[in-house]
Amino acid sequence: MTHDLRLGVNIDHVATLRNARGGALPDPVRAALLAEAAGADGITAHLREDRRHIRDEDIAGLMAAIKTPLNFEMAATAEMQKIALSHRPHAACIVPERREERTTEGGLDVAGDEARLAEFIAPLRDAGIRVSMFIAADPLQIAAAARIGAPVIELHTGAYCDYHAEGEMEAHKAELSRLIAGAKQAADLGLEVHMGHGLNYETVTPIAAIKEVRELNIGHFLIGEAVFAGLSAAIGEMRRLMEEARA
């Protein structure tokens, strides 16, 4: 089924749970197959440089097993470019990465690294990989992403979600306004707009209602909710909220 608003399910934190104890379980590939069956339109996995959750063999396993597109999150390094070119996933989302961070803390500085990033993504595009830049809803970064030839951007919803969790509702509303404006700017520039980071049942509706957004990537919350409700139920409820917002 083709959805007006796609849901990409990030299965990184199934691997986090596995790696906490060692061994092979729980298996992120099994989680990806369950997510597909539950209505996910794609699977997202971030192969970090330190391999703290997803590992190289997970990417190979996902490429072999899943039928929906794989969105390969990666830093802009020669090592990751080589891995992406060897597997040729449907999409590659270029994200900033720092070893000391717990999770991806901000957007990529495309405007400050334009020439290098343009050169970096060219071989990925030539290989037929759909390149996305993970950026803040900043007009300068959105314009830079368009200039370097990235067909897709993913706007970072982390601050929007954090303000909601902290009860900072004025800042939360201001961040939502920035995301709405960023989505419009990007669409006007011919970019496909995705959003993600920190979204949950409470925060997804206003984001899903933004008409320019084509895809949401959600992971940590769904994997956490699956502990209580099961992965299929968690994805089903997220899908329901997204479709309700879209309607």
Image: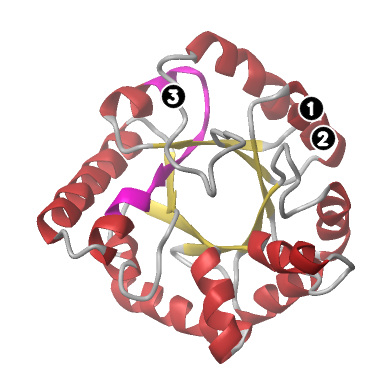
| Among the two numbered marks 2 and 3 on one chain, the one whose residue lies closer to the N terminus | 2
> Does residue 64 appear anywhere in the picture?
yes
**Is residue 120 placed above or below 59 in the rendered structure?**
above
Q: Residue 83: which numbered mark, if any?
A: 2
> Does residue 157 appear anywhere in the picture?
no
Asked whether the residues under the numbered discs 2 and 1 touch, taking CB atoms below 8 Å apart as contact, a structural biologist would say yes
Give residue 245's quadrant in the image. bottom left
Whole-percent x, y for residue 61 in the image: 87, 59
- Where disc 3 sits, the SS reads loop
**Is residue 247 placed above or below 56 in the rendered structure?**
below
Q: Nearer the viewer, residue 190 or 238?
A: 238
36 within the magenta span:
no
Q: Disc 3 designates what residue?
A: 109
Label 1 is placed on what type of residue? Answer: Glu
Name which residue lies at 62% across and 81% down. Answer: 38
Residue stretch rendered in magenta on the structure? 144-160
Q: Is residue 61 left or right of residue 110?
A: right
- Where disc 1 sits, the SS reads helix
Q: Residue 115: which numbered mark, if any?
A: none
Label 2 is placed on what type of residue? Answer: Ile
Point out the image quarter for the N terminus. bottom right
- Where disc 2 sits, the SS reads helix
